[in-house]
Amino acid sequence: MADLHVVKDYMDKRFVTLQADMDVYKAIDILLEKGVTSAVVTDDHNQAVGILSEKDCLHLIAKDSYHQLPSAKVSNFMTCDVFCVSPSTSIFKIADIFLHKHFRRIIVTDAHNEVIGQITRRDLLRIIKQWKTEEREKKVAPIL
């Protein structure tokens, strides 16, 4: 693995975004419809201002009784502590971050702090599988 492995080569460029002023129930509908466990919350300049996760949404139940679920905006429930990396960040650095933090996804931003992608723990599992497959193929390649 002498090649430089960086985030831009593996990041997901198709991802779900939400807005902070969006109704949290609409956001839950989007999470369920898209089959994702969280989404990046962006501002009008496509800069990350938070992440809304399934766990964040569970606070709706804790806030009120079963019959009186509160109405609120995404901003009332999202996690505001956003961790971003550049597309040139090493995959090995990303693995280290995942091992030492409780993040499930890391947001990728460009030089203008605009969100351009994300990389998840699952993406790293795919990378491991890809590297193992490539290693096997090298071992069985015919010698010419």
Image: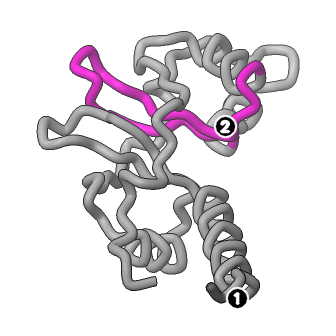
Residue 128 visible within the image: yes
Local crowd size for mark 2, using a 10 Å CA cut-off: few (<14), some (14–19), many (≥20): few
The quadrant holding residue 109 is top left
Q: Which residue is mark 2?
A: 59
Place of residue 74 in the rendered image (x, y in percent of width and height, measured from the top left): 51, 23
Tell me which residue sits at (36%, 50%) in the image.
81
Place of residue 106 in the rendered image (x, y in percent of width and height, measured from the top left): 44, 53
Tell me which residue sits at (24%, 32%) in the image.
114
The first of marks 1 and 2 along the sequence is: 2
Residue 77 visible within the image: no
Q: Which residues are magenta?
A: 33-54
Question: 26 and 139: which one is in front?
Answer: 139
Q: Is residue 67 magenta?
A: no
Residue type at tag 1:
Lys
Q: Which residue is mark 1?
A: 139
Tell me which residue sits at (71%, 83%) in the image.
142
Distance, label 1 to label 2, CA atoms, is 51 Å
Q: In the displayed orientation, state which residue is furthest to the right.
A: 66
Question: 50 and 107: which one is in front?
Answer: 107
The quadrant holding residue 33 is top right
The secondary element bearing badge 1 is classed as helix
State how many labels appear: 2
Considering only vertical position in the picture, is 34 above or below 39?
A: above
